[in-house]
Amino acid sequence: MDYRATLNLPRTDFPMKAELPKREPGRLAWWREHRTYERRLERNASNPPWILHDGPPYANGDLHMGHFLNMVLKDVFVKIALLDGKYARFVPGWDMHGLPIEYETLKFLGVKDFHAIDPLELRERCKERALFWLDRQREQRVRMGNFGLFDHPYRTIDPSFEATIVNALADLAERQQIYKGLRSTLWCIHDETALAEAEIEYEPRVSPSIYVRFAATPEQAAPILAAFNFAAQDDAKVSFLIWTTTPWTLPANAAIALRGDATYGLYRIGDELVIVAETLARQALAERFAQATLVARARGSDLDDLAVRHPFMDRDSVIVLADYVDLETGTGAVHTAPGHGADDFDTGMKYGLPILNPVDAAGRFTAEAGPYAGMHIFKANAKIVEDLERGGALWSVANYEHSYPHCWRCHNPVIFRATAQWFLAMDQNLLRQRTIDAIEDVEYTPEWGRARQRQMIETHPEWCLSRQRTWGTPIPSLRCLECDEAVLDARVARLAAKRFAQAGASAWWSDPVETYLPPDFVCPKCRGTRFEKEKNIVDIWFESGVTHLAVLGRDGMPWPSDLVLEGGDQFRGWFRSSLITAVALKGRAPYRHVTKNGWVNDEHGRPMSKSRGTGIDVKDAVEKWGADVLRLWAASVEPIDDVRFGPNLVEQVGRVYRNLRNRLRFMISNLDDLEPVAVVAREAMEPIDRLACGVADAFVASVKSSYDRCELHDAYLQIVDFESALSSLYFDALKDPLYSRAAGDPRRRSAQSALLYVLRRFCTVLAPVLSFTAEEAWQAVPSALRGDAESVFDASFDVARNRGASESDLRLWQTLRALRARVAAAESPRDFEAQLALTVTPQAHKRLAALGDNLREALVVSQLSLHQSDRADGEVEDGVVSFALSPAGGAKCVRCWKYRELGTDPRHPEICADCAAVVRALA
């Protein structure tokens, strides 16, 4: 007889094959239709808020896997807070101004020179492109399974946001935190704008490495030799030897910097006397060091304020002192061009040197560069080297590969260029120190982020706020037409903010200047009354740096935020700019907790790149693998470090996903005939079922603790371990009572009730990471068993209300896992083919005996005898004194597969008495 029809075989519509790319869009539609996130947010509205403030991505292209990692991690934390009952209102944002968008727009329009298009026309086209990419990126973020108010994001192009930016400038101007000054700042000659440090990337570059003589006239040589206390016996030519990799900066040279506490040597080589730092002489003089004789020494401080001649310009170069002079490379005598270097500029201001800047915005020499006027600076390098050689000033030349600053957007090399810009003064009002102090009130994950952030503030130069581009929020500054004074007045800025809130920031380009002049406004320098508007836009790092002012502190979202999470480069980017603006305007950090994620590299650890065939966009990855497997990958890696991504890694995570899905399917498929009235109360369950519920609660509490510490990788490992325990211990134990007992048998109902409880707890833990799958599993549970929880996101962790397993119970669970593993590992007999004689210590006997026949079920054997030894627990591992498997007595029941006495019912000679009773009841 075929007894298959008499078994309670699993039944469910929850498919074994996930087909995530096919099914996930339907789940998104369901969430949207049922307002799943919004309804839970409304339900949590009276509870404490928990806010993750979104650092805005640029709306200028499709999202890549680095975006995926960051955005899914944010979503996981938002959902954790949501399931914890908190008011987790997440407002996604987009950075929609600035060079990244302007650059993409010009490329789209086929315009190579931004000067060739009307500013208002370019601004309108930039807005269109930014909105286009926002819609694309929003669709991709939602497709990841992310929750948030995506229909109402914050956008830096919104008039209200532009007004917030300008009001922040007004507040800073009122506090005298902003000034306009001439400084040597980073400059992109391709994009023709000043740049901030955060807009720089370092890339390899080959530059001409040249050593150059700066020779002294006889009149200049006399005090130089006197400083060395050396009297020359001939007319030997005296010169300082400098090293540079930027020959194009030599036309702007005004000085040579020495280190005051260093010893400089006067070396005779043939008919000339050459001065270099003594510690660098061998490498500086190179092959001529062998012919060199050290004839005298002098301290750098003894040479201060002397002079030599410029090698090809008709002027002197002054000897100055500077602490930044390096004694590891070069010559110890540093070519100093105040117009082309930050340190050089500071030295120039200290010594009153001329700030020479013979380079225009596009990187061409001006007339001030003499014979090089009109040449592109990098193309002029060869000509300058040639002229140095012809004039006898060139000591040596070679190619030199080094790390050089490049523009983050166009990837062209940048320069330092002295221009008048608007700056935020880092030391005015003790801003730098106050910002450093504010870091101590912030939690950092990892903890070393605190030191990293402190370093980024300590070394932050004056913050260059102005950009010479079109697409952005204008700095509402004026230029007096009578004295040329630049004015940033808080009253003007507030009028601009009010106007921008109504009409948008493009009004600055179309309105007459009178729109922004307060009554009786005059120039603070000359009392003049005629002005024109400056056309600088504010640094987009300032725009994103005040998002906390535009988003937080309203709509139930407190200021500061609870968490910010971005890539590690944001310690010098958004983390820093937000921190500085917040301390300057509100006196404290705008966030309580900072955590970072690493870069996403390919499977070999190389940066992902489409040109190498290793780059992949989010939309392509989700279409191929589905979002949930990728979300599980994001949790499986150690996200604070650089991580790897690729098909092989996805396949590995996919195997874990399939295991998790199969455990969900097992639980759901055994609940098909369970009615709410038949659910067994926990205290009435069988011992092993009560134990499983307690272990599930402990598991939820432990995972929740890892979630709260932002340790998603640890949570992932706990999920995998719990899944393994379910599969290898508990589910194996339940298969016999679930399948072979009568449908309404109390033992079966106890098992089903425990499965329902464990399923609910497991789905709740999985939901932040495997959002689609947890929801799919939840919906597959019979509706009557779901109660009021329409969605898995209506559930809660309820860690405080649910009693977890005691330490004794957890030890018992691990003991059962170990014993079951020994049975499963046996070659023969094993499982139901075996009977087990188990001898244990008194304490272990007490714990195991309390399980009754559940112990035999858990170990999946046909017979079990439990014996107590007089040995103490500490003497043997897990309290097990002896473990002996032997062939089970009886014969194999063809229905339940246990070895029993068969044929007690003559009508059913192949099955055991228990199975025969079930079959008779079904007749």
Image: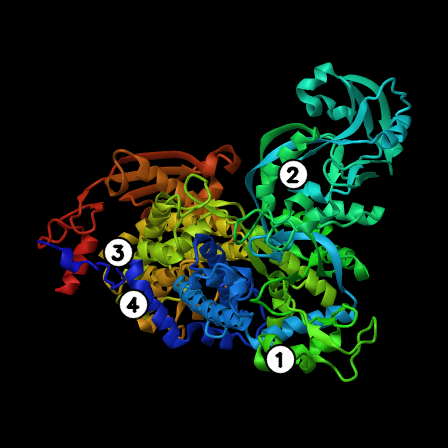
| Horizontal arrangement in the rendering, residue 614 relative to residue 557 (left or right) | left
At numbered mark 3, what does the secondary structure look like: helix, strand or loop? loop
**Which amino acid, mark 2?**
Pro
Look at 29% across and 57% down and name the residue there. Answer: 18
**Which amino acid, mark 1?**
Asp
**Which amino acid, mark 4?**
Leu
Which residue is identified by label 3? 17
**Which amino acid, mark 3?**
Lys
Q: Nearer the viewer, mark 1 or mark 2?
A: 2
Which residue is identified by label 4? 674
Q: Is residue 65 above or below residue 527?
A: above
Residue 315: assigned label: none
Residue 289 x/y as whole percent: 71, 18
Residue 44 x/y as whole percent: 52, 74
At numbered mark 4, what does the secondary structure look like: helix, strand or loop? loop
Discs 1, 4 touching: Cβ within 8 Å: no
Distance between the alpha carbons at the discs numbered 1 and 3: 62 Å
Distance between the alpha carbons at the discs numbered 2 and 3: 65 Å
Which residue is identified by label 1? 511
At numbered mark 1, what does the secondary structure look like: helix, strand or loop? loop
Q: Is residue 415 above or below residue 171?
A: above
In the displayed orientation, state which residue is furthest to the bottom.
519
Look at 29% across and 67% down and name the residue there. Answer: 674
Q: Nearer the viewer, mark 2 or mark 3?
A: 2
Residue 795 x/y as whole percent: 44, 68
* Label located before the other in sequence (3 or 4): 3
Which residue is identified by label 2? 247
